[in-house]
Amino acid sequence: MTTIDSGAATTAAGGEDFVEIRSVLVANRGEIARRIFRTCRELGIATVAVYSDADAGAAHVREADVAVRLPGEAPAETYLRGELIVKAALAAGADAVHPGYGFLSESDAFAAAVADAGLVWIGPPPAAIAAMASKTRAKELMAAAGVPLLAPVDPAAATAGDLPLLVKAAAGGGGRGMRIVRELSVMDGELASARAEAIAAFGDGEVFVEPYVEGGRHVEVQVLADAHGNVWTLGTRDCSLQRRHQKVIEEAPAPGLPEELRDTLHRAAAQAARAIDYRGAGTVEFLVSPAGSGEGAAASGRAYFLEMNTRLQVEHPVTEAIYRIDLVALQIAVAEGRPLPAALPTPHGHAVEARLYAEDPAADWQPQTGTVHRIAVPDGVRLDSGVTDGDTVTVHYDPMLAKVIAWAPTRAEAVRKLAGALERARVHGPVTNRELLVRSLRHPEFAAATGLDTGFYDRNLGALTAAEATGDGLCALAAALADAHGRSRFGGFRNVPAGPQVKSFARAGTTHEVRYRLGREGLDAADFPGVRLVALAADEVVLDVDGLRRTFAVARYGDQVHVDSPLGARTLTALPRFPDPTTRTEPGSLLAPMPGTVVRIADGLAEGDRVEAGQPLLWLEAMKMEHKITAPAAGTLTALPARTGRQVEVGTLLAVVAD
């Protein structure tokens, strides 16, 4: 459903002058910078990038017409330095600044600084940003505007009857500074942890506490407003599938909402925008309670205001897909002073977006780093990517690699299309959540739209991340054959009988040893009696398995071998013939699971202390998130080489807990 809420003027006054934007600096990086550049190129607008030293070779830098260096690597030194970005815009001759999302996109001070420098700000007025910058103050404004809210809870006065509760940072977003509290005994610790993470991410340690709605849905409304009194509401999006309060899969329109509830959401979103004299693109986010929950709840559940994001959302492509619009182009038009078109867009079909992260869902969502050797998706879906082949994922920024978006006439078709595209995608490099995305889209709860709530991964993560071993042996055989062909001038075939070739690969804790001979009679592989070799190249192997022909695409990067086939994608580790015995570590050693910085050590913790299983020992900061390192078992802390502020690599010894 699309609605327009018009004020006194719906069109520009006759003869009114508009600002013409000819060059835009994007105060951001990665995927969103590339996305904005794409629209600018289509509109004939020149582009300016800014970049940190860590991003010197990044895709958004290569694609811009002009790029300006921000010395340093960490966001606090670079992308969060508003004065440097304004200076860069002026030096490059830009006449407008687009903030993207994250970083300074919701900084009223930065928006004001851009305007004070004589540049056009492609975003809402600073006063509107300030009104929504603090979630606590935003809730006060929304209450006055009649928007439904969850009542705040005083943590000092909370009782067991109030549980579960949600600790939430007043500033920022992206799930940072958020903690669920299910036991009052951990309240103080979670408050401290949330404050520390909020300070690190946003420079603001204010937090608040409110009821945590079990089984709630995260539903939001896209709004777009101009300076002529027009406020559009462009339907709903469901963003309930989240990990660590960060969205993973989004779709539009939100399925299964009764007409009455959709109307309530649209009205509340328009009220929120009008209450702060909003302009540009923004999103009003709501928590929709399960049907029949909450005092006086209707059969379809109730909607509660969460926050307003005064910027473009990561998930904006699903709205663009169903309305066939370009939200970035509309943002630019509004910033130029133009009215929204009189003809409202009409929604068509359904769109689903999946966020591809460099992370390991089976290992507590640990972010991953390294070279992205290959990233490609089949035709027919949209890829908004922050990286291209050969780019590096570093520890400094969010681990999202790309967004993949599918549109179709119906939800079922869109979900099937996206799952199939992700399954056939080529994603070579760090561990990603690609398999989790495919399984999530095909999960019965998601497919039937009956399990769309923020607890989806709490319920299903184990099954969704269970290692799939079927086909691993065939993939290892294909990897071995391709490797032999690539290393041999003669394609690996032998003219005389010889001993078998032996190669070993590891995946998901299992070693696959492949023994085979290649001769004039073809392939003779132990443990694969029904397999016949059809074709062989260094990057492709075709096998006939009991009459079924399958093609295996093989790519090797160092000891990592990626095999893509109809059996799915497999990443194998080629094992050396003679393992290095020096790689063993002392029992009880806690090694850094990712590169990062030690930001905190538990108060008073020292060598010789007795610790309990699961007790927090220290915290690592990596990719804008804190990661808690806990004792694996009860014992004595015999070593604590970790120090606050120390940067560590994967495998660095942090502590030793002995029995």
Image (cartoon, rainbow, N blue to C red):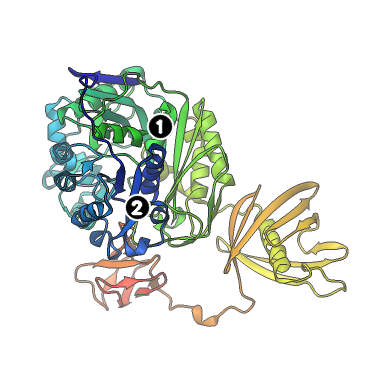
Q: Residue at x 49, y 30 (%)?
A: 448
Say which of 536 and 581 sits in front.
536
Where's residue 159, x and y in %?
16, 43
Q: Amino acid at mark 1?
A: Glu
Q: Earlier in the sequence, mark 1 or mark 2?
A: 2
- The secondary element bearing badge 2 is classed as loop
Q: Which residue is mark 1?
A: 320
Give the number of the disc on residue 553.
none
Q: Quadrant of the C terminus?
A: bottom left
Q: CA distance from mark 1 to mark 2?
A: 21 Å
Where's residue 397, x and y in %?
34, 57
Q: Quadrant of the N terminus?
A: top left
Q: Is residue 190 above or below residue 74?
A: above
Where's residue 328, x and y in %?
34, 37
Q: Is residue 167 left or right of residue 536?
A: left
Q: Is residue 480 above or below residue 136?
A: below
Q: Which residue is mark 2?
A: 29
Q: Residue furthest bottom?
A: 582
Tell me the quarter of the picture where residue 311 sits: top left
Q: Is residue 533 left or right of residue 341?
A: right
Q: Few, some or many C-alpha atoms within 10 Å of disc 2 (few <14, some 14-19, many ≥20)?
A: many
